[in-house]
Amino acid sequence: MDWGTELWDQFEVLERHTQWGLDLLDKYVKFVKERAEVEQAYAKQLRSLVKKYLPKRPTKDDPEVKFSQQQSFIQLLQEVNDFAGQRELVAESLGIRVCLELAKYSQEMKQERKMHFQEGRRAQQQLENGLKQLETSKRKFERDCREAEKAAHTAERLDQDINATKADVEKAKQQAHLRNHMAEESKNEYAAQLQRFNRDQAHFYFSQMPQIFDKLQDMDERRATRLGAGYGLLSEAELQVVPIIGKCLEGMKVAAESVDAKNDSQVLIELHKSGFARPGDLEFEDFSQVMNRVPSDSSLGTPDGRPELRAASSRSRAKRWPFGKKNKTVVTEDFSHLPPEQQRKRLQQQLEERNRELQKEEDQREALKKMKDVYEKTPQMGDPASLEPRIAETLGNIERLKLEVQKYEAWLAEAESRVLSNRGDSLSRHSRPPDPPATAPPDSSSSSNNSGSQDNKESSSEEPPSEEGQDTPIYTEFDEDFEEPASPIGQCVAIYHFEGSSEGTISMSEGEDLSLMEEDKGDGWTRVRRKQGDGEGYVPTSYLRVTLN
């Protein structure tokens, strides 16, 4: 079924329908254009959002980037940014493949429709003109017939009139003959015109207009097909980016699963671990002993000993620096303003950078030497002397970098020794018992004889150990006998195991209850006795938890 056959008399209907189809095409183009603008605005807002939340500092300078949480967040932002890029591709695809192409196609359809309807109107005009000509010839034929009939009637009347002259009768007959001839010509002309009009009319209704209507039908069907394809482009533009969007969403999922709380805790340790040893235990400052002591010439302190106590207290406070306010530090080249662990890391980074630069300069020097050799063997390729300044500059850079590498290696070795030293102190303090005092236990016989000798021992024990004393054996052999005091002055519990390998010391097990026989006189040793009474001797004060009676 086609329009030319079924809608042969619906010219105005087809005109309205085809115009409606083109209006629908334009409406869809406008819709897609606005849809593309929405996608573009959406992508722009997403990119602005990502830019707002991305770190402002470069990644290499931002310590927070080392945390998996921050890395996942940045990856999430990057995936959102890629997602915004896909929305921009959708907008671009819609703008080009739909808006521009369909708008151009709509203009072509409008021109084609206009041409077809102009052709139809010309055919209608021609048919109307033929009908007018037919009507004109018909009226002329009708008029000529009446005139001929009238002339024939007049000639017959004069012929029968006895009073009419022969000349009048003859003239009337000639006039009637002429009118008959004219009517006959009008008849022939009318018949010819009628035949021509019928032929034109048949051609108009059975050939010319059906062809025009069929062209309009073909045009409208092509327009509808193209519009349907345009509908499909809307979903096709989305489907083209679905795989990438799927990867973006998968990347977001991976970013979410990449958060590693344990690793972040470790990263925090690596970033901020100072490398300092933990502060040691505060010593008991027995101000009551000052009242019982007698000034001695061997004492290094004042008679009342207060300055030394204040100094010890100051040293104790100095050890607890992490809990106080930190003063503003001055940045130094060797990073000595940083804690040992951080200093070591920064020096390691600087050393690696210098080594990379040094390797680069050495590679460049080798390349320049090879190029110089080529120039010397093939002078037409270049002047060897032109490379001398660059070679000299490279050698200078190499020497400078070597000196910097040596400097950083020395600093790094010193920093690593500090870290190992602090780490060893910390481990020894907290994972194993503290080292016993470097000085030997006091002379028990003299300590039990008189109080004056005790004061002398205290004065001499308060002297700081010399540098040579740090390298002497921890325990010194001695042979002493102890006089039992009347009764213990307190109780104590061993918090660490101690092996009394030197004479004058006593072994004890962790958790063992002991009787306190004599307090620490400042030399780090305390005299204890076993509960069973089968042993008495000195043990390190730091190995005990003391309770005085």
Image (cartoon, helix red, strand yellow):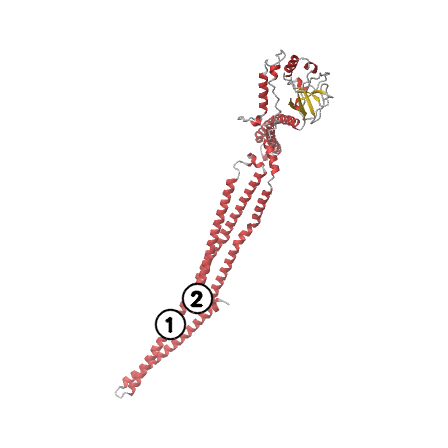
In the rendered image of this protein, does residue 33 appear above or below residue 460? below
Residue 345 location, x and y as percent?
A: 60, 30
Q: Is residue 254 left or right of residue 107?
A: right
Residue 178 visible (yes or no):
no
Most distant residue in the top direction: 297
Callout count: 2
Q: Is mark 1 on a helix, strand or loop?
A: helix
Mark found first going from the N terminus, 1 or 2:
2
Look at the numbered discs 1 and 2 and tell me whether their residues touch, using CB distance below 8 Å.
no
> Given this view, does label 1 or label 2 mark the residue nearer the observer?
2
Depth order, front residue of 179/232: 232
Q: Quadrant of residue 188?
A: bottom left
Q: In which quarter of the image is residue 19?
A: bottom left
| Label annotation for residue 141 | none
Residue 151 location, x and y as percent?
A: 31, 81
What amino acid is found at the position of numbered circle 2 in the picture? Phe
Most distant residue in the right direction: 534
Q: Quadrant of residue 287?
A: top right
Q: Which quadrant: the C terminus?
A: top right
Disc 2 designates what residue?
Answer: 11
Dot 1 alpha-carbon crowd within 10 angstroms: few under 14, some 14 to 19, many 20 or more: some
Q: What element carries label 2?
A: helix
Dot 2 alpha-carbon crowd within 10 angstroms: few under 14, some 14 to 19, many 20 or more: some
Depth order, front residue of 530/357: 530
Residue 527 location, x and y as percent?
A: 68, 20
Q: Residue at x 57, y 41 (%)?
A: 72
In the rendered image of this protein, does residue 43 appear above or below residue 220? above
Q: Distance between the residues labelled 1 and 2?
A: 24 Å
Residue 164 location, x and y as percent?
A: 26, 86
Disc 1 designates what residue?
Answer: 133
